[in-house]
Image: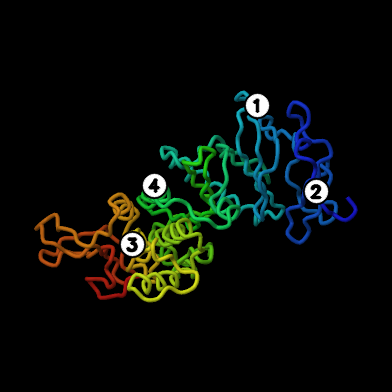
Amino acid sequence: MDCGYLVQPEAENLRGEAGSSPEGLPVLCLNPACGVANSSADRVCQRCGSPLPAAPGTVLHGRYRIERQLAAGGFGAVYQAADLKEGDRQVAVKDMICTDPLEFTIRLNFFRREAEILRSLQDLPIVPRIFDFIQQGQTAHLVMELIQGQDLLKIMEGHGNQPFPIDQVVRWAQSICDVLTHMHNYSPALVHRDLKPDNIMLLEDKSEIKLIDFGTARDMGRTQRTRMATKTRVYTEGYAPPEQIIGKPEPRSDLFALAGTLYHLVTGIPPEGFYTARELEKQLAGESISPGGVPERLLETYRWLFELIKINLAEDANDRYVSAREVKTDLELQRITKEAACPQCQTINKVREPYCLKCAAPLTDATPPCAHCGKQNRMGSRCCIYCGNRLR
């Protein structure tokens, strides 16, 4: 308690007898400029005065007994807890820790949005269940299903960046596409904005996954003004496309992140945004492999998959697939669909053509209204067919 250094206790002493709280286990301050260890009896940091995460043994709202801290960051902490009203059912509790009232209001909106999104996705098996959302004064807690497992990035790093089996990754990607399709079909569409290996948990059965951290997801806005307004810039370098980096994400931004995630999981190499697409294009064209590139044997065996990744890592959103549903179809067929018949006249068109070349029937989903004339076009259109305005 003099210098702030955390002395790691022996593993068997982390929990007391019969699950009682650890005696004297220090609590780390979450202030990144501080980070010292405090006594478990303290509620504010003795060095900087910042509020501390709850100590093991604390009972929140008369119901959730904290057993241990799982993670901590700038927004607060995540605990493993026992639900005393449900037979000590193990749950995960996200605790929002914030002293500034204005900042608390902003963070509370993110918390509420995450709770609402999780409730709307409860029918999808790879989304964690939500049990409770509690806000009292300057505290807020989100109670969710406890995921027993480890995120995919930590697993790879723990095995020397060894990639996962491709067939398994393809199956995971199909499940993720179901979640994205569900989110993107909302009106207005919901965009995840932070899809990456860190936010995918592999369960203890080493087969099934859970997609976590919907706290950064947001809708695209109901009006033209809100759709065009710059959003909060939330992104992870390497997984985010240019439009998201400048604060204007859209549903196809999630397809970019999915492609980057697939690339990382099947190669063990972190993506470098659309630069990875350019490297893949050279390799698929038969040019020499640069150091750190995809092995030639892997590229040839799963050429269709790397074609799919390359397309969705395109710098321009109009060069990517138009929907997660389309991505899932090609993942299931294990091929790149290049042509599609017009449902009206049966003329064969190139895939992702917005309108049939023969009868002009719409072939893709509608876009948000044009910023200039307010009329809707079709996904894949680069310019408005009514006024000629460039579409983003």
The residue tagged 3 is 303
Q: Position of residue 51 (x, y in %)?
A: 76, 49
For the C terminus, the image quarter is bottom left
Viewer-side label of 1, 3 = 3
Cα–Cα gap, marks 3 and 2: 56 Å
Viewer-side label of 1, 2 = 1
Cα–Cα gap, marks 3 and 4: 17 Å
Viewer-side label of 1, 4 = 4
Of the image marks 3 and 4, the number of the one nearer the N terminus: 4
Kind of residue indicated by mark 4? Arg
Left or right: 240, with 369 as reference point: right
Kind of residue indicated by mark 1? Leu
Of the image marks 4 and 2, the number of the one nearer the N terminus: 2
Q: Residue at x 47, y 52 (%)?
A: 164
Of the image marks 1 and 4, the number of the one nearer the N terminus: 1
Up/down of 90 relative to 39, above or below: above
The residue tagged 1 is 84
Viewer-side label of 3, 2 = 3
Q: Secondary structure at mark 3?
A: helix
Q: Secondary structure at mark 1?
A: helix
Look at the numbered discs 4 and 2 and tell me whether their residues touch, using CB distance below 8 Å: no
Look at the numbered discs 1 and 4 and tell me whether their residues touch, using CB distance below 8 Å: no
Cα–Cα gap, marks 4 and 2: 46 Å
The residue tagged 4 is 171
Q: Position of residue 119 (x, y in %)?
A: 47, 40
As drawn, the label of residue 44 is 2
